[in-house]
């Protein structure tokens, strides 16, 4: 379960952010989570609740997870498409010369503190 490792990393980052900004508590964290990260949102939320409540800074803090759709660009025709629906092969020109643009993000977007 890599969700717990992600939560521990988030807590370390949020502890640094809290110290840099003089926060005594954080009430809410918004996380951007790409749909092809392999992270299971319900597991992530369970891990968050367990770990955050064991810290003074994050006790009771809510975690809002915003899914970022996976989008791929075709390097041959230049068009983009939904990655999950079509995979690596471009549905417009059938090329496999493609790159994932979005969908692997795991980024803290916003922190609400006191």
Image (spheres, rainbow, N blue to C red):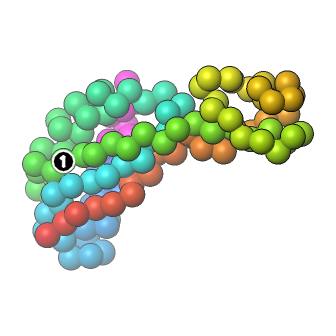
The residue furthest front is 92
Determine the image quadrant of residue 57.
Answer: bottom left
Query: On the rendered image, what quadrant is the C terminus found in?
Result: bottom left
- Seen from the viewer's position, the closer of residues 14 and 30 is 30
Q: Main secondary structure of the magenta part?
A: helix
Above or below, 69 against 43 in this view is below
Identity of the residue drawn at 25% across and 46% down: 63
- Seen from the viewer's position, the closer of residues 81 and 105 is 81
Taking 17 as reference, is 56 left or right?
left
Identity of the residue drawn at 43% across and 30% down: 39
**Residue 15 % position (x, y):** 27, 61
Q: Is residue 49 magenta?
A: no
**Residue 97 % position (x, y):** 85, 33
Residue 71 appears in the rendering? yes
Identity of the residue drawn at 82% across and 45% down: 78
- Seen from the viewer's position, the closer of residues 56 and 37 is 37
Query: On the rendered image, what quadrant is the N terminus found in?
Result: top left
Badge 1 marks a residue whose secondary structure is: strand
Taking 30 as reference, is 95 left or right?
right
Taking 21 as reference, is 78 left or right?
right
Q: Which residue is mark 1?
A: 62
**Residue 61 % position (x, y):** 16, 51
**Residue 87 % position (x, y):** 68, 24
Category of crowding for the residue at label 1, using alpha-carbon neighbours closer than 10 angstroms: few (below 14), some (14–19), many (at least 20): some
Magenta-drawn segment: 1-7
- Seen from the viewer's position, the closer of residues 113 and 90 is 90
Above or below, 110 against 95 in this view is below
Image mark count: 1
């Amino acid at each position: 379960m890599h969700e717990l490792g992600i939560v521990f990393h988030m807590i370390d980052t949020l502890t640094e952010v809290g110290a840099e900004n003089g926060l005594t508590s954080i009430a809410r964290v918004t996380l951007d989570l790409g749909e092809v990260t392999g992270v299971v949102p319900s597991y992530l939320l369970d891990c968050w609740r367990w770990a955050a409540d064991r810290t003074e800074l994050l006790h009771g803090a809510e975690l809002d997870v915003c899914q970022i759709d996976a989008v791929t660009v075709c390097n041959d025709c230049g068009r983009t498409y939904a990655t999950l629906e079509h995979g690596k092969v471009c549905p417009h020109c059938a090329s496999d010369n493609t790159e994932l643009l979005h969908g692997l993000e795991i980024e803290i977007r916003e922190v609400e503190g006191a």
